[in-house]
Image (tube, rainbow, N blue to C red):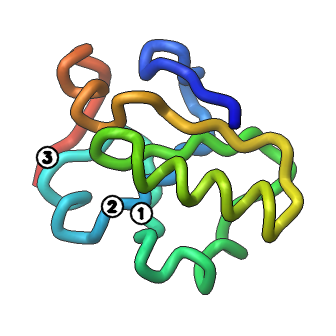
């Protein structure tokens, strides 16, 4: 599984946040799209498979599950887990939104 630090996510990357909607509303990386892990398989078709896919959650656990699903069930090899998740993203003072 490919993994990057939050500071290594390119600007404008396809960033998929797999946290639940209430967590996403509270705080999120700027530009992230919410596809909750609880309904991820049903919504995975919303992801553009032709672009690199960066997956983020709160700390890295749920995003790793989503990356594993995309690699194994969908056969994608351009999926990257964002280490440390949204917590690390905010701590690094990267662009984020609240509310």
Query: Label 1 near label 2: C-beta < 8 Å?
Result: yes
Query: Label 2 near label 3: C-beta < 8 Å?
Result: no
For the point 56% across and 22% down, the residue is: 4
| Image quarter (top left, top right, bottom left or bottom right) of the C terminus | bottom left
For the point 28% across and 45% down, the residue is: 58
Judged left or right of residue 85, residue 33 is right
Tell me which label, 3 or 2, sits earlier in the chain: 2
**Residue on which the image places disc 1:** 34
Judged left or right of residue 87, residue 10 is right
Q: How many marks?
A: 3
Query: How many residues crowd around disc 3 within 10 Å: few (fewer than 14), some, or many (20 or more)?
Result: few
**Image quadrant of residue 18?**
bottom left
Helix, strand or loop for disc 1 = strand
Query: How many residues crowd around disc 1 within 10 Å: few (fewer than 14), some, or many (20 or more)?
Result: many
Judged left or right of residue 38, residue 78 is right
Q: Is residue 96 above or below residue 5?
A: below
**Image quadrant of residue 40?**
bottom right
Tell me which label, 2 or 1, sits earlier in the chain: 2
Q: Is residue 19 above or below residue 51?
A: below
**Residue on which the image places disc 3:** 98
For the point 85% across and 44% down, the residue is: 77
- In front: mark 3 or mark 1? 1
Where residue 19 is drawn, which disc sits there? 2
For the point 84% across and 53% down, the residue is: 76
| Location of residue 26 in the rendering, given as x and y in whole percent from the top left corner | 12, 54
| Image quarter (top left, top right, bottom left or bottom right) of the N terminus | top right
| Location of residue 82 in the rendering, given as x and y in whole percent from the top left corner | 49, 33
Query: How many residues crowd around disc 2 within 10 Å: few (fewer than 14), some, or many (20 or more)?
Result: many
Residue situated in front as seen by the camera: 11 or 24: 24
Tell me which label, 3 or 1, sits earlier in the chain: 1
Task: Measure the alpha-carbon separation of dots 3 and 2.
Answer: 14 Å
Judged left or right of residue 27, residue 50 is right
């Amino acid at each position: 599984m490919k993994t990057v630090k939050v500071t290594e996510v390119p600007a404008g990357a396809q960033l998929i946040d797999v946290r639940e909607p209430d967590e996403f509303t509270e705080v999120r990386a700027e530009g992230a799209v919410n596809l909750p892990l609880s309904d991820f398989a049903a919504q995975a078709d919303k992801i553009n498979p032709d672009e690199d896919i960066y997956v983020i959650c709160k700390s890295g656990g749920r995003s790793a599950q989503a990356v594993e699903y995309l690699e194994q069930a969908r056969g994608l090899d351009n999926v990257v887990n964002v280490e440390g998740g949204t917590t690390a993203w905010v701590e690094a003072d990267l662009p984020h939104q609240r509310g």
